[in-house]
Image (cartoon, grey):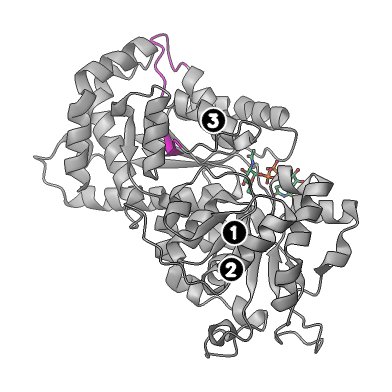
Amino acid sequence: MKIMIIVGARPNFMKAAPLIAAIREHNQRTVALSPKKQPIEAEKIQGVLVHTGQHYDEALSGSFFADLELPKPDVHLGVSSYSHAVQTAEIMRRFEEVLMRERPEVVVVVGDVNSTLACALVAAKVSYDSDETRPLIAHVEAGLRSFDRAMPEEVNRIVTDHLSDLLFVTEESGIRNLKNEGIPDYKIHFVGNTMIDSLLVSQKKADRSGILEELGLRNGLSKPLSANGTRKYALLTLHRPSNVDNREKFLSILEGLRELSDSCPIFFSAHPRTRKRITEFGFESFFEFNNGESEASGSKGASPQKGIHILEPLGYLDCLCLMKHAALVVTDSGGIQEETTCLRVPCITVRENTERPITVSSGTNTIAGTQTERIRNAIKAQTNKVPSARAPEKWDGRAGTRIVEAILLDLHRSRSTMRCSSEDTSRRADSVGDTLVGEYQRAIE
Ligand code: UD1
């Protein structure tokens, strides 16, 4: 059986890696299975990894493949940066050819980027033959809602969810949102968070990253200097167009960080979009561009005392390491809100909303908005606070395995009816319905 997994942009890679690992494990298990097992359990999965090329730089893509030990993509569509419409259309055009050639039984899309939407849309409309056979569409990280349709990701999430046959949810709010939108129960699977699977698997390797030494935050094998409270640091990431493409908003956020940057160094992993805007808006004076060199000593490896220090976009392991030891993380990323929750590091989110409310109710995340005063107050309230975070349910490193098992179960049920016209889908609903949910739950517990 062939399962195609789509990745395109930086936040996709860590969400997809656990699926590839789970497929590998499934294939190893099949070798040892008794012939009495169901054919589908004994069948090998051919995983086909497709990279759309939405992110193409080494820093945003290549280094993540290395850090996550992802195999080289089987197919690279080579699409790069354009407007939303052109990028989405170009991915669709190139992906359709691949889908018709490869004919997978399942297409798995992850997250909420343009690649996610584009490939789900193609898979929903493709027809392998005159019987209108098409692949099942599985969406990993379904159901998240910011209720802000000005966010391109929100549009991508809603459309992808409504096109998908299997919706894999990371937190309880996702189940609620999908049900409220009329998605039937049997499609919804609460499996946990594959991004957290990757984090848990990568922690040891991240601990060996040399980034703390490089930035002068740890000497040799000693503890990070932040541990004694004298040389703490904060980590900053900003890339949302709504924050950095708008001069006033970007300025307001930077002003909100001024006090913090006077009291400790802030390391800023800057997305290429953000770098461009800094130059365009003439904001250079807010930053230090010395990339790990101390303004005090001028020597690499000595810890700076203050200022916002621009770094190239961080690789996955370096980012995890810096996140884990930071006194505070300030971000507009979705994934970092979740990673800080898992690592129990206080996080200030410079957005008006979050589609990941579990990160707030778990106690690590504060939604501060983008106004200077609110950011300043949120930072004051969070600094030096060790959040008493609860690990969200099922964020236990097993989401990838649960997803592959649920896909197998669904395929087993629907193999004879691969036609997934709406008529067929409702027929599957009638026959499979709650039984599937029950069997699946038993299979993964
Ligand atoms: C995309 C996702 C966003 C995700 C983010 C993570 C969408 C709608 N947005 O936003 O959800 O949080 O990735 O980074 O899919 N660029 C490079 N090198 C690259 C890729 C992009 O320099 O490898 C620059 C280009 O100038 C490009 C800009 O970054 O115009 C934006 O890239 P794009 O993929 O359009 O969106 P992101 O802002 O990265």
Q: Secondary structure at mark 2?
A: strand
Picture quarter with the N terminus: top left
Q: How far from the left and from the top, in percent, is residue 388? A: 41, 67
Magenta span: 127-143
| Closer to the camera in the image, 36 or 300 | 300
Farthest residue, direction left: 36
Nearer the observer, disc 1 or disc 3?
Answer: 1
Spatial separation of the CA atoms under disc 1 and disc 3: 33 Å
Q: Earlier in the sequence, mark 3 or mark 2?
A: 3
Q: Which mark is residue 119?
A: 3
Q: Is residue 398 visible?
A: yes
Specify few, some or many for label 2: CA neighbours under 10 Å numbering under 14, 14-19, or 20 or more.
Answer: many
Q: Which mark is residue 326?
A: none
| Closer to the camera in the image, 310 or 264 | 264
Picture residue at 66% right of the left edge, 40% below the top: 78
Specify few, some or many for label 3: CA neighbours under 10 Å numbering under 14, 14-19, or 20 or more.
Answer: many
Note whether 258 is above or below 20 in the view shown.
below
Q: Which mark is residue 348?
A: 1
Q: Is residue 336 visible?
A: no
